[in-house]
Amino acid sequence: METILITGAGSGIGAATAKLLSQRVGIRLLLVGRRKGPLDEVCASLSHADKHVTASVDVSDARALVDFLGSSLADLARFPLVAVFANAGVGGPNTFGEDDRWEEIIRINLTGTYNTVQACHPWLRRAQGVKHVLVTSSVLARFGVPGQSAYVASKTGLLGLVRSLAMEWSGEGVMVNALCPGWVDTEMAQASIQAMADAEGISFEASKDKQEALLPSGAMSSPEDMAQWVDFLFSGLGEAIDKRRVGTFTGQALDVNSGSWMG
């Protein structure tokens, strides 16, 4: 049996990914998030729910992550760590001043992801074959928006982190990549749309329609859409993108954004 770690697994993309990956034979999931209740609810909905593990861990606390992994992965022979989906994050605006959320957003989105993958690295390198690290960045790493400097900076920083770690770890068989979603119908996205609706004095539905009208596809993605991409990469099929040898797809950003950014 092999292990896959998912952070931010209590809702949205993380929860959808857990549900899809749990259908694989021989996979144990480590579901991590800030709130144990939602994690347990997700776990109860999974295939073979009894073999998965949930834990309330703050990804900004490096020591807590190291301790959790030490206790959960002690039996490497039975449960080697083969993939990590570092998906935990927060959104929303920030404004310079006493109530600036800059430190909070950077600490969770950028430092928290760094902590996650670094804590996992010693366990990944011990597993056989090709291993995967995938971090959730954003289409906003490709262009800026007003009022969200911390979020944009954190998600852009993740692309630099991915490139650096790909250079460091790929020779060990650890492939490091990023997923850059656009609008995805999650609680975070709904909160953002509601904030825009309130600012314009229009309904949530009108604000959502307005945002979707800007997308070439005409519709935002679902968490299940994003989960399919995680599953694709973790399945090993992603290696077919480069046919020279197994384990060459690394240091890349997968832009799945309904056409809102095309390079």
Image (cartoon, helix red, strand yellow):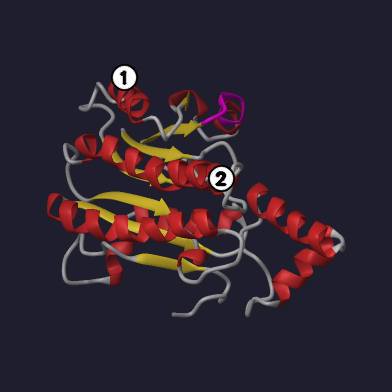
Q: Main secondary structure of the magenta part?
A: helix
Q: Which residues are magenta?
A: 34-39
Quarter of the image that includes the N terminus: top left
Asked if the stretch drawn in magenta spans residue 98, the answer is no
Which residue carries the number 1 mark?
A: 71
Which residue carries the number 2 mark?
A: 101
Depicted 91 relative to depicted 77: above or below? below
Q: Hey, what amino acid is under mark 2?
A: Arg
Q: Image point 28% across, 37% down: which residue?
A: 120
Residue 188: percent from the left, percent from the top?
Answer: 64, 49
Q: Image point 61% across, 25% down: which residue?
A: 37
Residue 192: percent from the left, percent from the top?
Answer: 69, 55
| Location of residue 246 by image quarter | bottom left
Is 186 left, or right, of 84 in this rendering? right
Q: Is residue 139 visible?
A: yes
Q: Image point 30% across, 71% down: which residue?
A: 241
Q: Nearer the viewer, residue 138 or 171?
A: 138
Q: Return the residue found at the far left.
A: 171
Q: Quick one: SS at disc 1?
A: helix
Q: Hey, what amino acid is under mark 1?
A: Ser
Dot 2 alpha-carbon crowd within 10 angstroms: few under 14, some 14 to 19, many 20 or more:
many
Q: Name which of mark 2 and mark 1 comes first in the sequence.
A: 1
Q: CA distance from mark 2 to mark 1?
A: 33 Å
